[in-house]
Every structure is written in C-alpha cells, then in structure tokens.
Amino acid sequence: MQTQTPVRSPAAPHTIADGSGPAQPARGTSAASSPEVFGNIFIGIAGMIGAGKSTLATALGKHLGIDTYYEPVADNEYLADFYRDTARYSFAMQVYLLNRRFQQHQEIIWRGRSAVQDRTIYEDSIFAKMLAKTGLMDERDYRTYVELFRNMSNFMCKPSVIVFLDVSPEASAERIRMRSRDVEQKIELGYLQALNDGYQEFIESISKVIPVIRIDYERFATAEDMAEVIRREYLDASFLRNVTRFDPAR
C-alpha cells in the first residue's frame, strides 16, 4: 500500500464557524492510545451511506483522545427537500454540503490538533458526479460545482490518511433500513449501486493523492482494531509519492 508523510499545518488564526466545532477528546486516554503515538494526524473516514463512518469516528476519537468532526445531518436544511425532489434540489444540496465540509475541513487545519472526520470533503464530488450522470443535476450546474470545488481545493491541506469502509450496496441498504432515518427511507437500491460504482472510481483516484486504507469493517469492529490497522498500514510503511491535486471530475 502507498502512503505519504502526515500533513503538519502551520500555526494559523483560531477561527471557528458556528455549529462546526468538534467533539472534544475524552479525558484519561491511556498512554498507549495517545495521539502522540501517531504524531499530528488527520484521519478521514470514507464510505457509503450507512457504512459506519460516524460510529468509527466516535470510537477512534475516544480511543485516541483526539477531536472528532461529524457530517452535518441533523441541521441540514436541504436534506428533506433533496430526497423529496432530488433533481430540483441537487445543486443547492451539493453546494451547501461543500460549503459546510470546507468550513469543517479548514477548522481541523487551523486548530493544528489531531482529528478524525466523519466523511471527507472529497466524497461530496462522488454524489455530484453521480447526480449529473443520472440526469438529476443539470450539466451546467455540475460544471459550476466542479469549478467551485477546484478553486476551494487550492486552500485545502490534505488529510494524513483516508480510511475507506468498504460495504456492498445491499449492506448499505440494510443498514439504512435498520437506523430508520425518515428522510432516507426512499433511497432505492439502484441509487446505492450507482453510488458504490462512484466510490470505487473515487478510491482509485484519491489514492494517487492521499494514502487510503481500505477496510472490511466487519473484520475490524473495534476502535482498538482500527487504531492498530492505521498504525501498521500507515505509520510503518515508507514510500515516495508524487503528490497531485485531486480532480473531482475524473
């Protein structure tokens, strides 16, 4: 597996946008699981809807004693409209998410502390691309979205590593059913299959820019297991990499 040296951001003004602050690290973390074991690390959790990103982010945050950032769901004012009339609200939804995720991403860098993030800003491009491919986003809107993403990416420091929770569309559908969020109940298997195809393309592309650890989450179900996987697969490897900018349209 290919890896890269962790990004260490320079000191920057402490700026926090409303509603985007992290869950603070748990006190009393053992020395063995302290963030110093990893250095200053920015872990992004990626995966399909219902893959277990929030659960893993929470567990890792507590186990490592680092800040945890969550995907904006409860206060997403476009979410219900998006699922009710996807074509009409697709562009507004994607711009809203891109803005919120950028706000969160930059806060992680500005704070200069180790952190784990539930869903990365890069994954938003998967949804936008899929919406455009399926005719649920106007091609003009998609071009505008891609240009906006590219401009914003000029100001983004990359995560140290992305942990990809690989689940099938069928498993994703079952987990969505089990967690019973009202706005998600109309999600069809065909949508999840198209989304999964997008994720496979995304992982192949993003791994050329950011080291990716691909995990069958069923096999590594505890924070201790995942912390050991990250340590072994990321920190113990050595490599040289030509870093390029991630292109959301590819």
Image: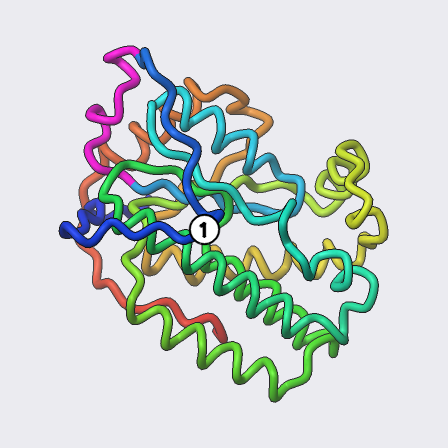
Look at 30% across and 17% down and name the residue there: 33
Q: Which image quadrant is residue 196 in?
A: bottom right
Give the residue type at disc 1.
Asp
Image quarter hosting the N terminus = top left
| Left or right: 170, with 202 as reference point | right
Look at 76% across and 57% down and name the residue there: 80
| Left or right: 244, with 250 as reference point | left
Q: Give coordinates of residue 240: x percent, y percent.
A: 17, 53
Residue 228 visible, this orientation: no
User: Please, is residue 1 above or below residue 131 in the view?
Assistant: above
Q: Give coordinates of residue 45: x percent, y percent.
A: 47, 42
Q: Which of 194 and 27 is in front in this view?
A: 27
Residue range highlighted in magenta: 30-41
Residue 24 visible, this orientation: yes
Total labels: the figure holds 1
User: Please, is residue 50 above or below residue 128 in the view?
Assistant: above
Does the magenta portion include 221? no
Look at 63% across and 41% down and name the residue there: 167
Q: Which image quadrant is residue 219 in?
A: top right
Look at 46% across and 52% down and name the residue there: 120
Q: Give coordinates of residue 11: x percent, y percent.
A: 14, 50
| Left or right: 87, with 91 as reference point | right
- Circle 1 packing at 10 Å, graded few (<14), some (14-19), many (20+), is few
Q: Nearer the viewer, residue 168 or 161?
A: 161
Q: Residue furthest front?
A: 18
| Left or right: 10, with 45 as reference point | left
User: Circle 1 — which element?
Assistant: loop
